[in-house]
């Protein structure tokens, strides 16, 4: 739904609309985030479009994030308390939720719709799980392990994808953080 809304806005304002079929390589992608850690790892997907957003970010030579100062955290989970979204094939949501909870702890909930009955359905026709974790993890390992569970489409963990973040500060200034050199 959000994708269709974005397309409508683009066309209404006279901008050129394209897709990854015509332009599979992008110079830059710009998006927001639900939370950004000190290594520029992200939690995204609070709005439900994590898989399509990750595909676009992955096709870009440079991925930039613009976020409010409240999204800045030392560790993922310091600010964002709604959990890490995981997009899943509908028939597999129960076993996936149990597997994530068993392997990593925390609580995994099926995201329910607010304005209609039933679960949230993504633009891809899938369900979203929200994993509320209870400790800091090695996010690269967690992301890989979760993505290997049969029925998982993708996670809202954007690991080592972001080049730069612009944080809008409370006083109206902008704080810029580049990817740390490790």
Image (cartoon, rainbow, N blue to C red):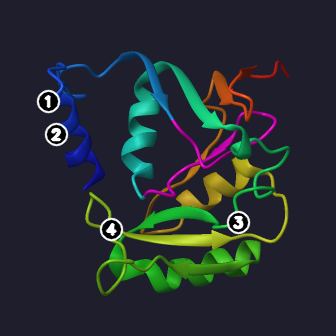
Q: Nearer the observer, disc 4 or disc 3? A: 3
Q: Main secondary structure of the magenta part?
A: loop
Picture residue at 65% right of the left edge, 21% below the top: 164
Label 3: which residue? 81
Query: Is 113 positioned to the left or the right of 124 in the image?
Result: right
Assign a secondary structure to mark 1: helix
Alpha-carbon span between mark 4 and mark 3: 22 Å
Q: Earlier in the sequence, mark 4 or mark 1?
A: 1
**Residue 171's spot in the image, x, y percent?**
74, 29
Q: Residues within 10 Å of mark 1 (few under 14, many from 20)?
A: few
Assign a secondary structure to mark 2: helix
Q: Earlier in the sequence, mark 3 or mark 1?
A: 1
Q: Is residue 143 above or below residue 173?
A: below
Q: Earlier in the sequence, mark 3 or mark 2?
A: 2
Magenta part of the chain: 32-47
Q: Are marks 1 and 2 in contact (CB under 8 Å)?
A: yes
Q: Earlier in the sequence, mark 4 or mark 2?
A: 2
Label 1: which residue? 11
Alpha-carbon span between mark 4 and mark 2: 23 Å
Q: Which mark is residue 126?
A: 4
Q: Are marks 3 and 2 in contact (CB under 8 Å)?
A: no
Image quarter hosting the N terminus: bottom left
């Amino acid at each position: 739904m959000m994708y269709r809304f974005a397309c409508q806005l683009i066309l209404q304002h006279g901008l050129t609309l394209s897709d990854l079929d015509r332009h599979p390589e992008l110079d830059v992608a710009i998006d927001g985030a639900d939370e950004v850690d000190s290594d520029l790892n992200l939690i995204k997907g609070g709005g439900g479009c994590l898989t399509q957003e990750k595909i676009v970010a992955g096709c870009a030579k440079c991925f930039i994030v613009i976020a409010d100062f409240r999204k800045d955290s030392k560790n993922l989970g310091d600010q964002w308390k709604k959990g890490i979204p995981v997009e899943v094939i509908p028939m597999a949501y129960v076993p996936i939720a149990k597997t994530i909870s068993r392997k990593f702890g925390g609580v995994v909930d099926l995201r329910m719709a607010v304005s209609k009955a039933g679960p949230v359905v993504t633009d891809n026709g899938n369900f979203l799980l929200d994993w509320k974790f209870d400790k800091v993890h090695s996010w690269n390992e967690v992301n890989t392990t979760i993505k290997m569970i049969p029925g998982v489409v993708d996670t809202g963990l954007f690991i080592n994808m972001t080049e730069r973040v612009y944080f809008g500060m409370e006083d109206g200034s902008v704080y810029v953080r580049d990817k740390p050199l490790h």
